[in-house]
Image (spheres, rainbow, N blue to C red):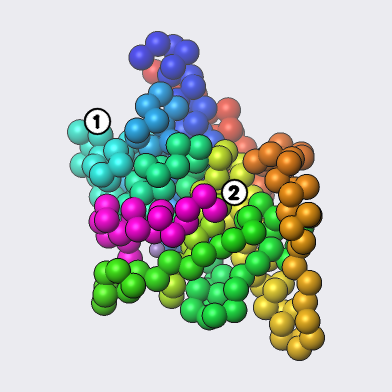
Amino acid sequence: MTGKDQSALDKVIGELVAANRILGNEGVCDAYGHISHRHPHDPTKFLLSRSRSPELVEPEDIMTFDFQGNPQDGRTDPMYYERFIHCGIYEANPDVNCVVHSHARGVLAFTISDVKLVPVVHTGASCGCEMPVWDIEDKFGATNLLVANVDQGRDLAKTLGKNRVALMRGHGFAAAGRTLSEALRISIYLPQNAQTQMEAMLLGGRFKALTAGEMEVRAAAGPDGSDIARAMQYWARRANCEHFLTYKKSV
Ligand code: MN
């Protein structure tokens, strides 16, 4: 690997470590949940931590996987059971570069209800108009509800389609970002959006979701919208992990 390639890889690894800690710190992931990034030098591979809680992830924990979920580089560390979520989504979506899986409390009710989760606040616009619910039972019958193999990951990706978020029945969600910051923005604001919709419904009246026109205006701003650097700096400072944003592997 050339020095330039190594520094591009270091940059992604550093940002991915920071993103892990941010998701832990913001309560999107707890002991469980994960975030991956497509490999910067090989679009058929992705980077994901060994089996570790996101808030504790270090650069050395980041491993490389293929779309069958096989670890590369001879690593034999314990792996996330549900890495197939990432396999399926990257395989089906060449424009997706960052995937998050979370069990965030705020969205869970919408994964088991026939009330449709929709974007209701402007920060929720990144989540997209449609957030389909994937029910593992439909195709795979009685399981432990976890995405445990390539077929299940592909089926989840099929339900996700070209949307940014798939809810997972009785489980959580998977988010697909074109950039790492988009994936973070979606994952942090999705539970807030869900909570707000639920509170509005508890008020008993009708609620107004973002309109199709408003969603178009937001989409035109691109995956990172405006001022994402400000948000990254804020999230990273709160999680005390700003130094990983300029990470360089020591040789
Ligand atoms: Mn899970």
The amino acid sitting under disc 1 is: Asp
Q: Position of residue 164 (x, y in %)?
A: 55, 52
**Which quadrant: the C terminus?**
top left
Q: Position of residue 134 (x, y in %)?
A: 43, 66
Q: For the residue labelled by badge 1, is the local secondary structure a helix, a strand or a loop?
A: loop
Nearer to me, 95 or 22 = 95
Look at the numbered disc 2 and say if its residue's Cβ is closer than 8 Å to ligand 1. Answer: no
Q: Which mark is residue 73?
A: 1
Q: Quadrant of residue 106?
A: bottom right
Q: Can you identify the residue that label 2 sits on?
A: 184
Q: Identify the residue shown where x is 73% and y is 41%.
A: 220
Q: Identify the residue shown where x is 35% and y is 58%.
A: 155
Nearer to me, 112 or 19 = 112
Q: Position of residue 78 (x, y in %)?
A: 25, 50
Q: Position of residue 84 (x, y in %)?
A: 32, 52
Residue that extends furthest to the bottom in the rendered view of this protein: 204
Please state the extent of the stretch shown in magenta in the rendering.
144-163
Q: Which mark is residue 246?
A: none
